[in-house]
């Protein structure tokens, strides 16, 4: 199903019973807002019927994740892909990528990619930035965004930007035990506002270009 969204989709927003919104079979939300309440979860799974497309797509959507649990789950029980494109932004909360899960970041027709703004990602799968090679695609990480575990693949036209966000100078993002294979660019503080990229727990970056801006810090 494709949802042309000019308003707000709410999941688990109004009561304390857990609510799950399941997306599969190339479900697509275009525009608007998606609010995940304290007891809500957006679950992306493979239905068992191959469509040749991502199992779910958020296209130019503003996601506000207030869940107490996993606000967004990708491939918790199956091999599934969630595509974020056209400047989709996820604000806060937690994202869990299963061992068969993929988070795919692409430019789309009307935007540069996607932003994870203060999101805590538990990754047992793969995060792909620019898997389809063109046009240039940017994943922005800011406001204490963190990715723990798993793999990240940055394609030849892919960019990972680390910026401060609203937290201001001295903040940015953390890669914790992530294996990064890059054929593109990782830019720390491209806006010269004092962003910090923290690498810990054996994070490795292979290939590509790592650029640290004049006010940026790699630690």
Image (cartoon, helix red, strand yellow):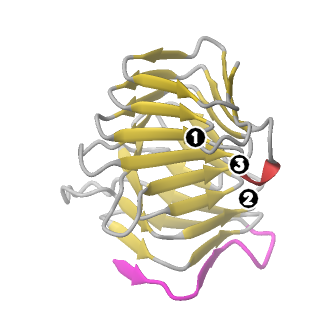
Kind of element beneath mark 3? loop
Nearer to us in this view, 53 or 201: 201
Give how far apart the Cα atoms at labels 3 and 2 are. Answer: 13 Å
Query: Dot 1: few (<14), some (14–19), or many (≥20) neighbours within 10 Å?
Result: some
Identify whether 141 is placed above or below 37: above
Q: Are marks 3 and 1 in contact (CB under 8 Å)?
A: no
Q: Are marks 3 and 2 in contact (CB under 8 Å)?
A: no
Q: Is residue 87 magenta?
A: no
Q: Are marks 2 and 1 in contact (CB under 8 Å)?
A: no
Q: How many marks?
A: 3
Q: Residue at x 39, y 44 (%)?
A: 78
Sequence-wise first label, 3 or 1: 3
Q: Residue at x 36, y 53 (%)?
A: 106
Magenta range is: 1-17
Sequence-wise first label, 3 or 2: 2
| Image-quadrant location for residue 162 | top right
Query: Dot 2: few (<14), some (14–19), or many (≥20) neighbours within 10 Å?
Result: many
* Residue labelled with disc 1: 190
Q: Residue at x 39, y 22 (%)?
A: 181
Q: Position of residue 161 (x, y in %)?
A: 54, 41
Sequence-wise first label, 2 or 1: 2
In the rendered structure, find residue 118 and report the number of the disc placed on it: 3
Kind of element beneath mark 1? loop
Give how far apart the Cα atoms at labels 3 and 1 are. Answer: 18 Å
* Residue labelled with disc 2: 67
Q: Position of residue 55 (x, y in %)?
A: 34, 58
Q: Position of residue 83 (x, y in %)?
A: 39, 55
Query: Dot 3: few (<14), some (14–19), or many (≥20) neighbours within 10 Å?
Result: many
Nearer to us in this view, 145 or 151: 145
| Image-quadrant location for residue 84 | bottom left
């Amino acid at each position: 199903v494709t949802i042309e969204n000019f308003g707000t989709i709410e999941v688990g927003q109004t009561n304390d019973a857990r609510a799950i919104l399941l997306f599969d079979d190339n479900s697509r939300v275009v525009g608007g807002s998606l609010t995940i309440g304290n007891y809500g979860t957006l679950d992306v799974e493979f239905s068992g019927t191959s469509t040749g497309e991502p199992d779910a797509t958020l296209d130019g959507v503003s996601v506000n994740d207030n869940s107490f649990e996993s606000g967004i789950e990708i491939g918790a029980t199956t091999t599934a892909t969630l595509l974020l494109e056209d400047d989709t932004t996820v604000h806060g909360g937690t994202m869990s990528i299963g061992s068969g899960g993929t988070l795919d970041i692409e430019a789309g027709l009307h935007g540069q990619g996607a932003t994870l703004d203060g999101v805590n990602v538990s990754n047992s799968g793969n995060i792909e930035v620019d898997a389809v090679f063109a046009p240039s695609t940017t994943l922005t990480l800011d406001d204490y965004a963190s990715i723990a575990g798993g793999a990240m693949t940055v394609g030849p036209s892919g960019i990972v930007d680390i910026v401060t966000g609203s937290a201001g100078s001295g903040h940015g993002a953390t890669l914790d035990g992530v294996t990064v294979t890059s054929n593109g660019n990782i830019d720390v503080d491209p806006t010269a506002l004092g962003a910090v990229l923290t690498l810990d727990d054996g994070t490795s970056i292979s290939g590509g270009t790592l650029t640290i801006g004049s006010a940026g810090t790699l630690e």
